[in-house]
Amino acid sequence: MTADDSDEPTADEIVEVASDAAEGLILSRYKQSEVTDMDVTVRFEDGTLDVDIYLNAPDDPDPGAVAQEAVEAAESAVDELFE
């Protein structure tokens, strides 16, 4: 069986889905104009998902909590790819 025959998502698909989920959650909590700076970095290597988020936004809601929720949203979105 070649990689093309597999139903498993590719690393690029995983990264895109995770990134979209994280950014979507952040932008659901803040208006885009309220976000001073945002960086979502997603890597998928050797079966391990790594999501790093930097968020500079107003204190309400708490940016740290929103960033953590965004990481969890990214992980959940990737989990759904494998179901």
Image (spheres, grey):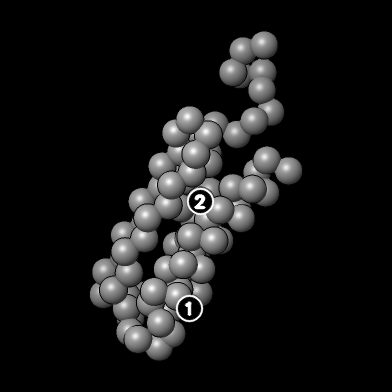
Residue at screen point 53% across, 41% down: 14
Q: Residues within 10 Å of mark 1 (few under 14, many from 20)?
A: some
Q: Is residue 12 visible?
A: no
Q: Is residue 83 above or below residue 61?
A: above
Q: Residues within 10 Å of mark 2 (few under 14, many from 20)?
A: many
Residue at screen point 37% across, 55% down: 52
* Residue sticking out furthest to the bottom: 60
Instruction: Please state which of residues 43 and 2 is positioned toward the viewer in this rendering.
Output: 43
State how many labels appear.
Answer: 2
Q: Is residue 1 above or below residue 82?
A: above
From mark 1 to mark 2, how far is it between C-alphas?
Answer: 17 Å
Residue 32 pos. (x, y %): 37, 75
* Residue sticking out furthest to the top: 1
Residue 56 pos. (x, y %): 28, 74
Q: Is the C terminus in the top left, top right, bottom left or bottom right quadrant?
A: top right
Disc sitting over residue 18 in the figure = 2
Q: Is the N terminus in the top left, top right, bottom left or bottom right quadrant?
A: top right
The picture quadrant where one finds residue 26 is bottom left
Q: Is residue 39 left or right of residue 29?
A: left
Give the residue number, with chain letter if any, for mark 1. Answer: 29
Q: Is residue 47 visible?
A: yes
* Residue sticking out furthest to the left: 36
Q: Tell me the amino acid under the disc marked 2.
A: Ala
Residue at screen point 56% across, 53% down: 75
Residue 22 pos. (x, y %): 48, 60
SS at circle 2? helix
Q: Is residue 70 left or right of residue 77?
A: left
Residue 64 pos. (x, y %): 39, 74
Q: Tell me the amino acid under the disc marked 1.
A: Arg
Nearer-N-terminus badge (1/2): 2
